[in-house]
Image (cartoon, rainbow, N blue to C red):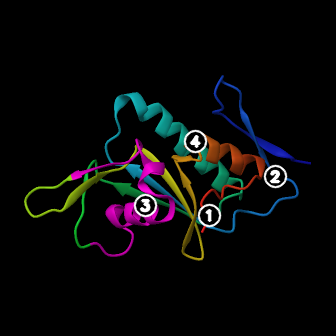
Amino acid sequence: MLRGLDMGGKSGGEPTIIRMVDREPLSAELTLYVRETVPDAASDRVSSALEGFDLLEQAGVVTDRRVETVPERSPGGDTTGLEPTAAYDEFVESVGWESLDPFFKTQRGTDGVDRVVTFPPVCVAIREDGELTGLYPRWNDGTHESIEDCLNALAAGDSVENVRP
């Protein structure tokens, strides 16, 4: 009987085991925001994270996953839906801008644009019934919660909810 699947990627080169037994799939929507251009220093890390989420989806752990490509710098202004600036505003409203620093950057815009938002190379937002319940990367009460923390929690069957109303 299959109890788990190997998923590479824990620091130190150890594979992560995706727990398959006695668990329900994630009931929330998982959105990956991936920058269209990723610095060379982060490209392996981003690829590894995307592969990890692919494996979680193949294993049936994640059943509602979207990937949104965000530009290097997303101009703010009139936004509709959850384009990058609107998503950033949702994140700030839920966890505060201090929790997002230094992962997200904002600066004044030019040419009629209020501000420009720069996302990290990859970001994970988890929403339950449209409400943000998880966000990675971020600071949470002095603890850095990384993309890898999210992947490891999902693989182990642990909660990934780190945003409280």
Q: Distance between the Cα atoms at labels 3 and 1?
A: 13 Å
Residue 63, located in which quarter of the rendered image? bottom right
Q: Earlier in the sequence, mark 2 or mark 3?
A: 2
* Numbered tag placed on residue 20 in the rendering: 2
Q: Which secondary structure lies at badge 4?
A: loop
Eyeballing the image, is 39 above or below 152? above
Question: What's the residue at 71%, 27% (across, down)?
Answer: 14
The local crowd at label 3, few if under 14, some if 14 to 19, many if 20 or more residues have their Cα within 10 Å, is: some
The residue that disc 4 covers is 142
The residue that disc 3 covers is 92
Q: Amino acid at mark 1?
A: Arg
Q: Is residue 159 left or right of residue 34?
A: right
The local crowd at label 1, few if under 14, some if 14 to 19, many if 20 or more residues have their Cα within 10 Å, is: few
Question: What's the residue at 66%, 51% (across, down)?
Answer: 56
* Numbered tag placed on residue 164 in the rendering: 1
Question: What's the residue at 61%, 44% (across, down)?
Answer: 52
Query: Residue 31, how many percent across, how many down?
Result: 51, 60
Q: Distance between the Cα atoms at labels 4 and 1?
A: 15 Å
Q: What range is drawn magenta here?
A: 79-107
Q: Earlier in the sequence, mark 2 or mark 1?
A: 2
Q: Is residue 151 left or right of residue 114?
A: right
Residue contact between numbered discs 4 and 1, judged by CB atoms under 8 Å: no
Q: Is residue 115 left or right of residue 17?
A: left
Q: Which of the two marks, 4 or 2, is nearer to us in this view?
A: 4
Q: Distance between the Cα atoms at labels 2 and 1?
A: 27 Å
Residue contact between numbered discs 4 and 2, judged by CB atoms under 8 Å: no
Q: Which of the two marks, 2 or 1, is nearer to us in this view?
A: 1
Q: Which secondary structure lies at badge 1?
A: loop
Question: What's the residue at 18%, 62% (across, down)?
Answer: 114
Q: Which of the two marks, 2 or 3, is nearer to us in this view?
A: 3
Q: Nearer the viewer, residue 58 or 14?
A: 14
Q: Which secondary structure lies at badge 3?
A: helix
